[in-house]
């Protein structure tokens, strides 16, 4: 049976769920030539007509289908083009009408923190996701935390979800572009770094308040990320002395920012997985993270944690982490080891195994 991959994400900026889809498919492509099980899946990526995007896969073809775009393409054109095969949707959405759909849901934030999202986006996805989850042939998610949350909010047994996580390996393949530091007015080792979209969930204003309370005029706080107001609404304004808002940066610039930062700060209230602190760890940058949601599960003992939403606790954690770094008491190898636990190749192999085993199970049942 043919296996189709929902390629709508190729029409969108690559971050979050789009990164997950791109890297998983790239890893499947890498092993397809030498792995008979993957080759037997008959993988093909379906995209809207007119899609112009990087798709560097050698063994997995990309085919344009239909005439629509956006959600209409997904619900109508994609469902029609994938009829008779398995359809893998890796970005949290897909057609309700497809009878053999694999769906990855990354978190339950749309239900747990609905006020963090713009009204139209919230209404659509609160309607769509539980129905997709209940109709899906197989379900994926990225952490044990998300599995429990999604089971509760979508009304499906937790056992229906297979956990196939993210990874930070992609950042290691990007050549660093350190010239961006001078452009942004940053000095190596003299700034703290936050990475995240300007959403209430990411809690970036908390980092700015804690940084101000830290009282270190010799340091700056660099915050990387865009707004995405159509999805998340208008976030709280972020400002302060020595706070640098970089906007979106290239992957090479991001690597350089991780590598030259004194600390990475992750104040998020809710994450299904949390890739940025793992990227920082992979590049040897010390991480201070909130203790919320999936973060202890993903980061293990390689991060210094603070009580979520507590500005005094974050300020104290930053001061202690900076002191440890200055005294040579922080081991970057602990972070690198933690990050290495997550691999796109292993994730792709797990997805191929799931698809193959499900096909075999259905064949026996028939």
Image (cartoon, helix red, strand yellow):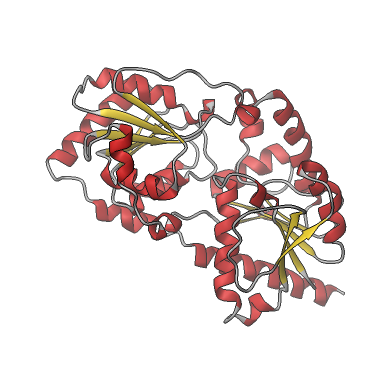
Residue at screen point 30% across, 39% down: 181
Quadrant assignment, res 153: top right
Residue 237 as seen in the image, left or right of residue 114: left
Image coords of residue 348 (percent x, y): 57, 66
Image coords of residue 180 (percent x, y): 33, 41
Residue at screen point 40% across, 56% down: 174
Pick whichever, 166 or 199, lies toward us: 199
Image coords of residue 142 (percent x, y): 56, 51
Image coords of residue 337 (percent x, y): 33, 58
Quadrant assignment, res 361: bottom right
**Which quarter of the figure is the N terminus placed in?**
bottom right
Quadrant assignment, res 122: top right
Residue 47 as seen in the image, left or right of residue 58: right
Picture layout, residue 340 above or below residue 321: below
Picture layout, residue 366 above or below residue 125: below
Picture layout, residue 29 above or below residue 291: below
Residue 154 as seen in the image, left or right of residue 283: right
Pick whichever, 280 or 26, lies toward us: 26
Residue 238 as seen in the image, left or right of residue 113: left
Number of numbered discs on residues: 0
Pick whichever, 226 or 324, lies toward us: 226
Would residue 33 be seen by someone viewing this image from the given angle?
A: yes
**Which quarter of the figure is the C terminus placed in?**
bottom right
Q: Residue furthest left?
A: 327
Residue at screen point 22% across, 19% down: 215
Would residue 290 be seen by someone viewing this image from the given angle?
A: no
């Amino acid at each position: 049976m043919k296996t189709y991959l929902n390629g709508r994400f190729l029409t969108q900026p690559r971050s979050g769920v789009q990164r997950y889809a791109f890297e998983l498919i790239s890893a499947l492509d890498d092993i397809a030539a030498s792995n008979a099980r993957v080759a037997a899946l008959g993988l093909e990526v379906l995209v809207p007509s007119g899609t112009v995007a990087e798709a560097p896969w050698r063994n997995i073809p990309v085919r344009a289908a239909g005439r629509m775009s956006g959600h209409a393409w997904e619900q109508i054109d994609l469902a029609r083009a994938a009829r008779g095969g398995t359809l893998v949707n890796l970005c949290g959405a897909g057609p309700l009408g497809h009878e053999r759909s694999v769906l990855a849901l990354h978190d339950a934030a749309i239900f747990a923190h609905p006020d963090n999202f713009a009204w139209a986006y919230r209404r659509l996805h609160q309607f769509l996701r539980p129905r997709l989850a209940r109709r899906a042939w197989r379900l994926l998610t990225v952490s044990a935390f998300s599995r429990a949350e999604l089971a509760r909010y979508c009304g499906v047994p937790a056992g229906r979800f297979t956990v196939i996580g993210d990874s930070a390996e992609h950042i290691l393949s990007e050549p660093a572009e350190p010239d961006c530091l001078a452009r942004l007015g940053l000095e190596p080792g003299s700034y703290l770094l936050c990475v995240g979209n300007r959403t209430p969930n990411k809690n970036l204003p908390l980092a700015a308040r804690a940084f101000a309370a830290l009282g270190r005029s010799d340091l700056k706080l660099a915050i990387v990320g865009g707004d995405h107001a159509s999805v998340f609404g208008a976030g709280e304004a972020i400002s302060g002395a020595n706070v640098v808002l970089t906007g979106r940066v290239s992957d090479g610039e991001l690597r350089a920012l991780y590598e030259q930062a004194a600390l990475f700060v992750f104040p998020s209230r809710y994450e299904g997985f949390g890739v940025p602190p793992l990227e920082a760890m992979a590049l040897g940058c010390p991480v201070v993270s909130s203790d919320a949601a999936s973060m202890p599960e993903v980061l293990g003992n390689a991060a210094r944690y603070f009580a979520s939403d507590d500005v005094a606790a974050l300020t104290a954690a930053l001061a202690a982490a900076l002191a440890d770094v200055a005294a040579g008491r922080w081991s970057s190898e602990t972070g690198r080891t933690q990050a290495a636990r997550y691999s796109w190749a292993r994730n792709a192999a797990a997805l191929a195994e799931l698809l193959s085993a499900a096909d075999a199970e259905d064949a026996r049942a028939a």
